[in-house]
Image (tube, rainbow, N blue to C red):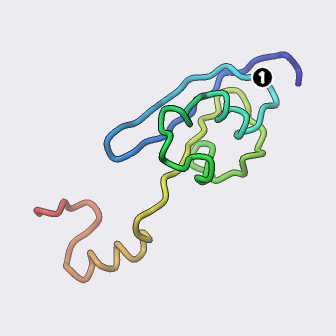
Amino acid sequence: MSGHHIKIELVYATAERQELIELSIEEGSSVEEAISESAIYSVFPDHGLDKARVGVWGRPVDRSHKLCAGDRIEIYRPLRMDPRESRRMLAEQGRTMNQGADD
């Protein structure tokens, strides 16, 4: 590694809580290295984050993806339901994704 550090962010959210961690990591670090360095695993120990899908600025990437200054790593929760199936079910009820359950 180069010894030069870059600043990045890492974010993970549950329905109840969002955690945003700002990190200074070595240039050339991978997503996996940044996640490990962030200690997010200890913040959410029972969430299976080691197997969760990840992305950078909304674009899915492999954990081996090399990071650039200003990148934002996102750790994705597993979906409870396929969004297409959810939209189909709402359409059958005459509702949309933007309407609450009580609308």
Residue 99: image location, x then y, percent:
20, 62
For the residue marked with disc 1, what is the amino acid? Glu
Q: Foreground: 53 or 91?
A: 53
Q: Quadrant of residue 34?
A: top right
In this picture, residue 96 sits left or right of residue 1: left
Residue 37: image location, x then y, percent:
67, 27
On the image, numbered disc 1 is attached to which residue?
26
Q: Is residue 9 above or below residue 66?
A: above
Look at 29% across and 64% down and name the residue there.
97
Look at 66% across and 21% down and name the residue there.
7
Residue furthest bottom in the image: 92
- Image quadrant holding the N terminus, namely top right
In this picture, residue 77 sits left or right of residue 90: right
The local crowd at label 1, few if under 14, some if 14 to 19, many if 20 or more residues have their Cα within 10 Å, is: some
Residue 27: image location, x then y, percent:
80, 25
**SS for dot 1:** strand
Residue furthest front in the image: 46
Look at 52% across and 50% down and name the residue there.
76
